[in-house]
Amino acid sequence: MTEIQCQDLEIGIYNYCIDYATEHQIPLCWSCDLFKELYIAKTKSLYANLNSKYSIKNKRLMKRLKENEFMPHELAMYRPENIYPEVWKGIIDRELLRTKAAYEPQATAMTDRYTCGKCKKNKCSYYELQTRSADEPMTMFINCLHCGHRWKM
């Protein structure tokens, strides 16, 4: 990096710290330890990403900076997934799959074996879960598909 690029990066780090401190009601002065820690942490983070010898091993970031993909001062405002997209893509994809699986309706077994105590219909879905010790039978959670009543056996 040239000296001008380094100065531009430092300006970006300082501006990031001012924005963050303003948003979180941190005093904007060098005598405030929290403000200094914020500045130092951001500087170390960017240095570790720019220096390919660090454990982060973000080899493309310096190349992207040299190719003028972004200005040095913009780098300080980037989120981690923009600084090192190769690593974060996998993390984000796994998190999306987990979130999707958590909120998607699960396929459950349906039966007419159980009668709802509320509406007296036999349309029910159920699933079994081991809620007690292993030597006891599994607990069956039953849901009436007609009225939505839930119970367990």
Image (spheres, rainbow, N blue to C red):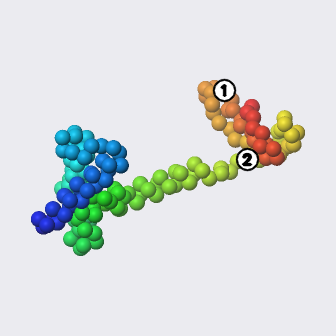
The residue indicated by pointer 2 is 109
Q: Residue at x 21, y 45 (%)?
A: 29
User: Could you tell me residue 24's position as x and y percent?
Assistant: 35, 45
Q: Is residue 74 above or below residue 94?
A: below
User: Could you tell me residue 148's position as x and y percent?
Assistant: 77, 43
Please identify the quarter of the rendering in which residue 31 is found: top left
Q: Residue at x 24, y 73 (%)?
A: 67
User: Could you tell me residue 76's position as x and y percent?
Assistant: 27, 58
Tag 1: amino acid: Glu
Quarter of the image where the C terminus is located: top right
- Name the mark nearer the viewer: 2 or 1: 2
User: Could you tell me residue 98's position as x and y percent?
Assistant: 52, 51
Sooner in the amino-acid sequence: mark 2 or mark 1: 2
* Residue at the extreme right of the image, as rendered: 120
Residue 7 visible in the shown view: yes
Q: Residue at x 68, y 38 (%)?
A: 128
Tag 2: amino acid: Ala
**On the picture, is 109 further left or further right than 65?**
right
| Mark 1 surroundings within 10 Å by alpha-carbon count, few (fewer than 14), some (14 through 19), many (20 or more) | few
Q: Nearer the viewer, residue 108 or 11?
A: 11
Quarter of the image where the N terminus is located: bottom left
CA gap, disc 2 to disc 1?
22 Å
> What label sits on residue 4 in the rendered view?
none
| Mark 2 surroundings within 10 Å by alpha-carbon count, few (fewer than 14), some (14 through 19), many (20 or more) | few
Please identify the quarter of the rendering in which residue 71 is found: bottom left
Q: Residue at x 11, y 65 (%)?
A: 3
**On the picture, is 68 further left or further right than 115?**
left
The residue indicated by pointer 1 is 136
Name the secondary structure under disc 1: loop
